[in-house]
Image (tube, helix red, strand yellow):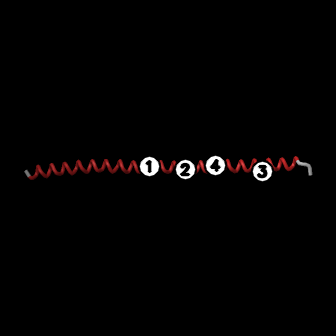
Amino acid sequence: MIDSVLADDLDEVSEWIKQTSKYINQLVGNQLGMEQSWSLEAAQEQERAEQAQLQTKRGADAGAALEQIKDKEQPA
């Protein structure tokens, strides 16, 4: 009788370990997925910032070029 109780308890413990292991694996997978998502978002934000800086520089360069053209066109 004691052997059957112990066997049942071992089965319950074994099942609990399996379920806990699955849950932990899901948590780890979710964490990795979130970290990848955050890395992607950070990279995309960096790209947007770089593009904005390039557009600002292009605008400034175009303005400077326009001023040079105007200066050359004006009689001395």
Which badge, 4 or 3, is on the more N-terminal residue? 4
The first of marks 1 and 2 along the sequence is 1
Compute the Cα span from label 1 to label 2: 14 Å
Residue at numbered disc 1: 34
Residue type at mark 2: give it.
Ala
Q: Residue at x 74, y 50 (%)?
A: 61
Q: Residues within 10 Å of mark 3 (few under 14, many from 20)?
A: few
**Residue 52 numbered mark, or none:** 4
Q: Is residue 58 left or right of residue 69?
A: left
The numbered mark at residue 64 is 3
Disc 2 marks which residue?
43
Mark 3 or 2 closer to N-term? 2
4 and 1 marks in contact (CB < 8 Å): no
Is residue 70 or residue 3 the one in the foreground? Answer: 70
Between the C-alphas of marks 1 and 3, the distance is 45 Å
Q: Amino acid at mark 3?
A: Ala
Which x, y percent locates residue 42?
A: 53, 51
